[in-house]
Amino acid sequence: MDELVHRDDRRPLPATGAGIGLRSAHYAEFLATRPRLPFVEVHSENYFAGGRHLEVLLDVRRDTAVSLHGVGLSLGSADRLSEQQLAALKSLVDRVEPALVSDHLCWSSVGGVYANDLLPLPYTREALDHVADRIDKVQQHLGRRILVENVSSYLEFTSSEMSEWDFLAALARRAGCGVLLDINNIHVSATNHGFDPLAYLRAMRADTVGEMHLAGYSVNRVQGEDGSETEILIDTHSRPVSAPVWALYETALQYLGPKPTLVEWDADLPPLAGLLDEAGRAQHRLQSAAASLRVAHAA
Amino acid sequence: MLHELQTDVMDALFERSERAMTHVHGGKLTPRQRLDIYRHNVFDSLSSALAAVYPTVVHLVGEGFFRFAAHEYIAAHPSRSGNLHDFGDQLPEFLAQFPPARGLAYLPDSARLDWAWHKVFHTDALPAANAAELLGHIAALPDEDRLQVGLRWQPAAQLVTSPYPVLRIWQINQPGAAEEGVDLDIGGESVLVAARHGEVLLERIGAADCALLQTLASGAGLGDAVAAALGHEAGFDVAGAILHHVTEGTLVGLARAS
C-alpha cells in the first residue's frame, strides 16, 4: 500500500501539539476568540450534510488544522461497507482537506441496523483479514491513510485468538493504516479486563502512531452474582483526564515519542477555557517529552 | 463466524435473543451484565440523540415520558445509518400512533416542526437568486409556458402545516420563554422553516401562501400553484408572494415543472 500518497503530510501536525474537540456548544465563543491551537478535531458525521456546522468548520479551518474523527464507518462490521457513508466522508474530506482522518477499531452495525455505539471485535484471524481488507478499501477510496483508534471495552469474546494490542499492531502492518492511540481507552480496558497497560504500549510501533487521545471516564459499580461490587470504568468523555491516565500518557510519550494529542470531551462540557486548560496540561507534557528526547539524543 | 457473532450481539442489545451469552467471557460479571452495559449505552445515546433533535417534544411531555417513548421508538425503528443525524425521522408518525401519547393531539405536528428545524440546520442552503432577473424571465415567457414553468425549492427550507397552532406551541416551549398557555381553538398554522443568515427561522404563513409554496415544492408548475393559492383566498397577491419568496431565497430558480 506504499503507493498511497500520504496527503496528510501536506500540512503535518506538530508532534508536540495538543488540540481540543470542537463542539457546537463552543462555536460562538470559539469564533469570537479564535484560540491559537495546533488543531481541532470534530466528529466527521456532524458535517456530512453541510449546513451551519460545516460553515463554522470551514471558517475555523482558515487558521487551524482540522482532524476528522469518524464514529460511523463501522470498520469491523460483517456487512458490506456503506457506500453512502464512504461517499459522504470522501466529499467532506475533499472540502475540508483535514490533517488527519480517523475512525475506530470496532463495529457498530450488522444486517443494516446500527447501534451507533463502538462495539468491540473478537480478535480472531478471520476478523483481522476482514478489517484489514475494509481499511484498505476505505484508504483507496479516500486516497489517503487513515488512523484507527482502540476503543474502551466492557466485555471480551471467548473466540479471541490474540490480544487487542497484537491485533491492532498487525492491522496497522497489514492495512498500512496508522494508529490513533487512545490512552484513556487503554486504561479503561486494562482496568476492566485486568491486563497490563504497558503491554499495549510496547506492542505499538512509534512510526505507526499518528495521534493520541486523552479523555475522562466514569466509574460504574455493578453487583456481581456473589453480591460483591465490581467497579467498571465507562468511557464517557464527561470528566477531566484522570491521574492514572496522565501517568500512562507520560509513559506512552517516553515509549513512542511526542504525538499530536487531543483532549476529548463530549458530555457535561466545561466552558471553552476549561477545555483549553486541559489541552495545556497535555501540551506541557508533550514539550517535556520532546525536551528529554533532545537530551537523550545529545547524550 | 464474525457475522453470526455480531448478529447475536445485536439481538442481545435489542433483547431479541440470548445467543450472545455464549460468545462473552464472564469473570467478575456475568455475560449478561456485560452486554447490559452496552445495551444501556446504546439506548441512552440514541435517546439523547432523539432528545437533541426533538427539544419541543421533550419540553411538552417531560424528560421521563420522552425517555420511555424514545426507548419504544428505538426498539421499533432502529437506526439505519452510521450518521446519527439521520436517526429519528419517523418519530412524528410513531408518536401519532403511540397510545400513551394519545391525549396530546398536537404532539406529532410539534415533532414535525422540530424535525424540520433539524433538517434545515443540517442542510447546505443554496444562495438566493436575483429576484428581478428571475421574475423578468418569467414575465417574458409566452402565456402558456408561464403556467407550466416551475420554481426550484430551497433544499434548506421545509413547510409544516397543522390543524393546531404549532408555531405558538413551539415558541412557548423554547428555553427562556414565558410560561403561558396556547388556546388550541385559535386554529391551525402553516410554518415555513428556512435558513437565513446562518440561523434557522420559523415564519408563520397564510393558508393561500402555504398552498402556493406546497404546490411549487411538489414540482408542479406556476399555473397549478396560482390556482391552489387563489382557491384559498380569491384576492391573494400571488406576484407579491413569489417576489417575497424569491428575494428571501425560499424559491431559488426556475425548474421544469413535472
Image (tube, coloured by chain):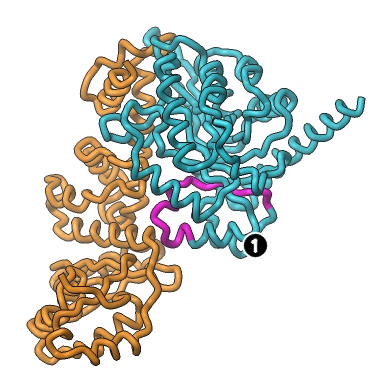
In depth, the one of B194 and B223 nearer the eye is: B223
Determine the residue located farthest toward the front in the rendered image.
Answer: A3
Q: Which residues are magenta?
A: A37-54
Q: Report which residue position mark 1 lands on.
A: A33
The disc numbered 1 marks a residue on which chain? A
Query: What residue do we see at 13% from left, 71% from top?
Result: B185
Q: From the rendered image, report the letter of the chain displayed in cyan.
A: A
Q: From the rendered image, report the letter of the chain displayed in orange.
A: B
Location of residue A73 with respect to B2 vertically, above or below: below
Residue A120 percent across, percent down from the top left: 42, 24
- Neighbour class for label 1 at 10 Å: few (<14), some, many (≥20)? few
Query: What residue do we see at 51% from left, 18% from top?
Result: A167
Compared across the picture, whether A231 is left or right of B159 comes to: right
Instruction: Write down the quadrant of residue B242 in the picture.
Output: bottom left
Q: So how many labels did they put on this image?
A: 1
Q: Is residue A223 visible?
A: no
Residue B113 percent across, percent down from the top left: 26, 62
Q: Quadrant of the C terminus of chain B?
A: bottom left
